[in-house]
Amino acid sequence: EVQLVESGGGLVQPGGSLRLSCAASGFTFSDYWMNWVRQAPGKGLEWVANMNQDGSKKFYVDSVKGRFTMSRDNAKSSLYLQVNSLRVEDTALYYCTRGSIWSSDYWGQGTLVTVSS
Amino acid sequence: DVVMTQSPLSLPVTLGQPASISCRSSQSLVYSDGNTYLIWFQQRPGQSPRRLIYKVSNRDSGVPDRFSGSGSGTDFTLKISRVEAEDVGVYYCMQGTHWPPTFGQGTKVEIK
């Protein structure tokens, strides 16, 4: 069974940092593109970033470029999102999803990032 | 960015009756490989999104056949042939043809 389990969220002040993690199981992690998608409380979905199988290609939406860094460890079947210089508008539930941008066939349960003073 | 516009945003439906959600894109979603990367997701209350339909009309494994997707170019539709109580939630279309991927605003389906 495919499972994606995010962790690392929390309450942080504006300008702060967090490292989000996504532990994958039930499939060969190194075979798949992976993504981060976020959802502000009570709002819709927003793509954040994605990465290819070996981590050599990474793409970010403009609103997070230069502040967020996506990485992966295929040996540990884990995906990461380093989020720096956080803003109030980054407050959201962060999901990791499996597959290319035209796939996203499995989603985790999300980890909540709250940016507030 | 490609703008995805869903309508209606709220859809009260009687159990057993059909429902239809429209999704329009600001640009054609036909990719250079000939595929159209339009996906439909269902998000039940308190749950993560679940993919229902990919590449316009392909139903995911385990998705009831009362769900169907259709459309082409810039105009797409998700239909539920007979709404059941478990279909309550928010439905999102998403395009994966152009970077960045973008979602519609969501359509909330509720039972009358």
Image (cartoon, helix red, strand yellow):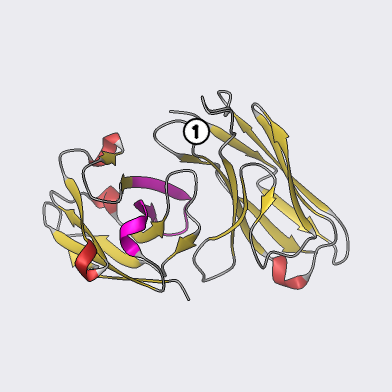
Name the residue beneath numbered marker 1.
Answer: B97
Residue at image position (46%, 50%) is A45
The residue most toward the bottom is: A1
Quadrant in which the N terminus of chain B is drawn? top left
Image-quadrant location for residue B60: bottom right
On whether residue A31 falls in the magenta region, the answer is yes
> Where's residue A70, x and y in %?
21, 51
In this view, A29 is above or below B92? below
Circle 1 residues within 10 Å: few <14, some 14–19, many ≥20: many
Q: Which residues are magenta?
A: A29-48
Quadrant in which the C terminus of chain B is drawn? bottom right
Residue B45 shown left or right of residue B78 in the figure? left
- Amino acid type at image mark 1: Thr
> Where's residue A13, x and y in %?
14, 59
Residue B12 shown left or right of residue B48 in the figure? right
Question: Which type of secondary structure does the marked residue at label 1 adopt?
Answer: loop
> Where's residue B48, x and y in %?
49, 66
